[in-house]
């Protein structure tokens, strides 16, 4: 099993999703319960504030060793945990 912060190309979607959920739990006022609710939403932009969204982008860049360009910071890439995981895996491939 690879670590989410490693440069391991075998990183899978579940690992990316777990790391993102963990990050959101740390920032959500209701902790893991709040992150579980966020995990189910299809529009993350309506559930978290803009500062947390920017911190999430910085976390994704650092944790998965990718660059999120301004054009990448769009709802299709950051609308849900699933969308973020797919974006990360595309970037790392």
Image (cartoon, rainbow, N blue to C red):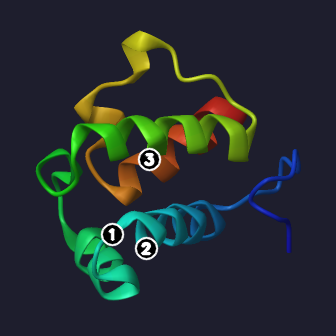
Residue projecting furthest to the left: 46
Q: Which residue is mark 1?
A: 28
Quarter of the picture containing the N terminus is bottom right
Quarter of the picture containing the C terminus is top right
Task: Please give left or right for residue 40 compared with residue 55 in the image.
Answer: left
The numbered dot on residue 78 is: none
Q: Residue 12: percent from the left, percent from the top?
A: 68, 61
Say which element carries label 2.
helix
CA gap between label 2 and label 1 equals: 5 Å
Say which element carries label 1.
loop
Q: For residue 67, which quarter of the picture?
A: top right
Q: Are marks 2 and 1 in contact (CB under 8 Å)?
A: yes
Task: Please give left or right for residue 65 compared with residue 44 in the image.
Answer: right
Residue projecting furthest to the bottom: 33
Residue plotted at (43% across, 73% down):
25
Residue plotted at (40% across, 64% down):
27
User: In the depicted view, which residue is nearer to us: 33 or 87?
Assistant: 33
Residue density around tag 1, few if under 14, some if 14–19, many if 20 or more, within 10 Å: some
Q: Earlier in the sequence, mark 3 or mark 1?
A: 1
- Above or below, comparing residue 22 to residue 89 in the picture: below
Q: Nearer the viewer, mark 2 or mark 3?
A: 2
Q: Residue 62: percent from the left, percent from the top?
A: 70, 38
Residue plotted at (19% across, 45% down):
45
The numbered dot on residue 25 is: 2
């Amino acid at each position: 099993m690879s670590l989410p912060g490693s440069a391991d190309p075998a990183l899978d979607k579940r690992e990316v999703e777990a790391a993102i959920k963990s990050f959101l739990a740390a920032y959500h006022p209701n902790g893991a319960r709040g992150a579980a609710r966020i995990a189910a939403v299809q529009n993350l932009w309506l559930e978290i504030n803009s500062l947390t969204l920017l911190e999430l982008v910085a976390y994704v860049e650092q944790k998965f060793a990718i660059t999120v360009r301004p054009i990448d910071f769009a709802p299709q890439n950051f609308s849900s945990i699933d969308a973020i995981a797919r974006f990360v895996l595309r970037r790392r491939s």
